[in-house]
Image: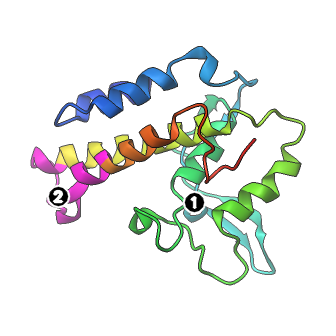
Amino acid sequence: MKGWSDRWNRAKTKELRAADEVVAWLEQPAARRRLPPTLVHNDWRLDNMAVAADDPGRCVAVYDWDMCTVGDPFTDLGTLLSSWYEPGEPYEFLSPMPSRVAGLPDARRSDRALRPRAARRDVSTMPYYYVFGLFKMAGVVQQLYFRWKQGQTQDARMSGGEAVAEGLIGLAHDQHEPTRVVARVGAS
């Protein structure tokens, strides 16, 4: 978590109380359970994998391993869920997920399908990983905006990044309440 909060702090262009509160919550040891470390992709999304032509639910290849590390395996699931927006949801324009393609499930159905497979693991802390994924996504967007603002890139798409990052922080903040049922990851 420290690496991601450091990135956020280096790239922030204004103070956001909600960001400070999300970071404080994510840094609490009780917010999640420590799982045995595994190989973590760190950018696990459908646009970084190939699926079988005859079964879009079966992954046949994974791309873009440049951020791979060893860590908590649920962080990849949190990253996936935090970048998976359905039509009509806020920030759907950020979604690399082809949820509207025939044969691919939406985020909620995918989460329900994963639960039986994850039954041997305690998934009660999944909201933590969703909030962590939202925070990571906000940090990446904020970094891109910061680079644009500093003139390090001319990509005009980055001009609205500060507002998008603030919105993602708002989503994370709204979801970090321990008593709140996170719609995206369901009740544990």
**Could you give the CA–CA distance between mark 2 and mark 1, rounded to whole angstroms?**
25 Å
User: Relative to residue 35, is residue 53 depicted above or below?
Assistant: below
Residue 59 picture location, percent across and down: 75, 63
Residue 106 picture location, percent across and down: 65, 68
Label 2 CA crowd tier, 10 Å (few <14, some 14–19, many 20+): some
Residue at left offset 48%, top offset 24%: 25
Residue 44 visible? The answer is no
> Tag 1: residue type?
Asn
Which of the two discs, 2 and 1, sits closer to the camera? 2
Residue at left offset 17%, top offset 54%: 153
> Tag 2: residue type?
Ser
Residue 33 picture location, percent across and down: 70, 23
Name the secondary structure under disc 2. Answer: helix
Residue that mark 2 sits on? 159
Magenta stretch contains residue 168: no
Left or right of 21 in this view: 134 = right
Q: Say which of 147 and 113 sits in front.
A: 113
Of callouts 2 and 1, the N-terminal one: 1
> In the image, which disc is placed on residue 134?
none
The residues colored magenta run 148-166
Left or right of 99 in this view: 153 = left
Residue that mark 1 sits on? 48
Residue at left offset 87%, top offset 49%: 117
